[in-house]
Image: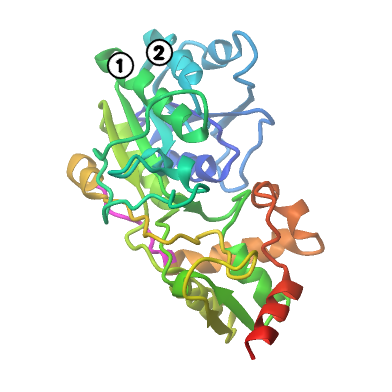
């Protein structure tokens, strides 16, 4: 039995691919849209795919055709994208839109936007509830644009019921900036040790694509105007992540702990933070009956296999431009060896 028509924008990315699979399995008739019109080999033949660039005038309206029961937007980033959807509310039954856990600010007004300043890293409550205060909406940063997007869509109310999913540190196959590469590449390179800042205790709550897809599936079947966090059932420390990846790869790595911030590139990981970032999933459990479909450790074998295959024969910056954009050499082994020698 067909539940209805679902339209997924940004379907070629890591979350979109998983969301399409979840919606199809739940009985939706799915149309996918992306700039390249990419199809995932795991999608069934009945999934319809179209090429669509939302920045082209009228392209989204034309691609949507006579409408859909649920519109899933993986790639909405600002208020303009929100207005695109509200402008088509007469053809959309409800929406599910991916936002970001980066929108929150702490009690001192610190956020992801201030983390580069002295004492600027936010100290959030553990865990962060979905109704915790956010930065102000605006167009100055990723975080402020995401909040502006959220406000635009929530203001539509019943005209366009929208579930906003504030995702944590997304991981899984097809990730353009995979944090797990920091450990995987070291094992592949035969690197016997790794330095971790903040005593290896940093926590940045991961969110596997299949768990986010489950949230999309549930929200599609239960329309409403709401904001929910999206994260895995656990928030491991960076040291625990390294140990879990070693176990998958059959490796034994020595860990050198730095009690404090990274020393230049030494000890700097994509999870490095002096305070934990952990998201509360209680609202999703209460409002949607959400239960995670995979744990962090259970998801790793597929992720590690994909990372190793995607990296094979290529320089890491070429293979993963989303990680390279930070302008940090996460694999400066010479600096690490010099630091270690100085400690001996």
Would you say residue 295 sits in the magenta stretch? yes
Position above or below: 243 against 327:
below
- Residue at point 49% right, 46% down? 18
Marks 1/2: CA distance? 9 Å
Which circle's residue, 1 or 2, is located before the other in the chain?
2
Q: Which residue is drawn at 66% across and 28% down?
A: 35
Q: Which of 289 and 40 is in front in this view?
A: 289
Of the 4 image quadrants, the one containing the N terminus is top left
Residue 12 in which image quadrant? top right
Numbered disc total: 2
Farthest residue to the right: give it.
313
Residue 173 relative to residue 94: left or right: right
Whether tag 1 and tag 2 are in contact, CB under 8 A, the answer is: yes
Direction from residue 98 to residue 220 in the image, left or right: left
Look at the image and give the residue range highlighted in magenta. Answer: 290-296
Q: Does the magenta stretch include residue 206?
A: no
**In terms of depth relative to the viewer, which is nearer, 312 or 70?**
312
Query: Which residue is nearer to you in this view: 314 or 149?
Result: 149
Q: Residue 263 carries which label?
A: none
Name the magenta segment's main secondary structure. Answer: loop
Q: Is mark 1 on a helix, strand or loop?
A: helix
Question: Dot 1, crowdedness within 10 Å: few (<14), some or many (≥20)?
Answer: some
Residue designated by label 2: 86
> Percent position (x, y) of residue 148?
41, 23
Q: Mark 1 points at which residue?
A: 155
When the figure is inspected, residue 190 is found, relative to residue 270, above or below; the finding is below
Is residue 298 visible from the viewing direction of this image? yes
271 is higher (above) or lower (below) than 37:
below
């Amino acid at each position: 039995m067909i539940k209805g028509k679902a339209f997924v924008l940004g379907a070629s990315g890591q979350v979109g691919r998983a969301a399409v699979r979840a919606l199809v399995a739940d009985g939706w008739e799915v149309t996918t849209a992306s700039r390249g019109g990419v199809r995932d080999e795991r999608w069934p033949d009945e999934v319809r795919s179209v090429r669509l660039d939302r920045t082209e005038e009228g392209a989204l309206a034309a691609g949507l055709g006579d409408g859909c029961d649920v519109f899933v937007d993986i790639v909405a980033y600002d208020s303009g994208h929100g207005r695109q959807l509200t402008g088509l509310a007469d053809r959309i039954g409800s929406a599910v839109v991916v936002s970001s856990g980066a929108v929150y600010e702490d009690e001192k007004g610190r956020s992801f936007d201030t983390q580069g300043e002295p004492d600027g890293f936010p100290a959030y409550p553990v865990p962060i509830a979905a109704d915790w205060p956010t930065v102000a909406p605006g167009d100055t940063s990723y975080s402020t644009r995401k909040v502006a997007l959220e406000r635009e869509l929530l203001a539509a109310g019943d005209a366009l019921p929208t579930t906003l999913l504030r995702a944590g540190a997304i991981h899984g196959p097809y990730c353009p900036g995979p944090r797990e590469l920091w450990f995987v590449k070291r094992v592949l390179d035969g690197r016997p040790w790794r330095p971790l800042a903040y005593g290896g205790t940093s926590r940045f709550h991961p969110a596997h694509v299949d768990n986010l897809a489950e949230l999309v599936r549930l929200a599609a079947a239960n329309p409403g105007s709401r904001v929910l966090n999206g994260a895995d059932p656990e928030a491991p420390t960076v040291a625990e992540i390294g140990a879990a990846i070693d176990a998958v790869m059959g490796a034994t790595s020595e860990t050198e702990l730095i009690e404090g911030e990274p020393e230049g590139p030494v000890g700097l990981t994509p999870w490095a933070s002096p305070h934990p970032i952990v998201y509360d999933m209680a609202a999703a459990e209460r409002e949607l009956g959400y239960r995670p479909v995979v744990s962090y450790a259970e998801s790793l074998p597929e992720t590690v296999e994909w990372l190793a295959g995607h990296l094979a024969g290529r320089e890491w910056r070429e293979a993963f431009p989303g990680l390279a954009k930070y302008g940090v050499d996460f694999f400066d082994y010479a600096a690490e060896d010099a630091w270690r020698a100085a400690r001996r």
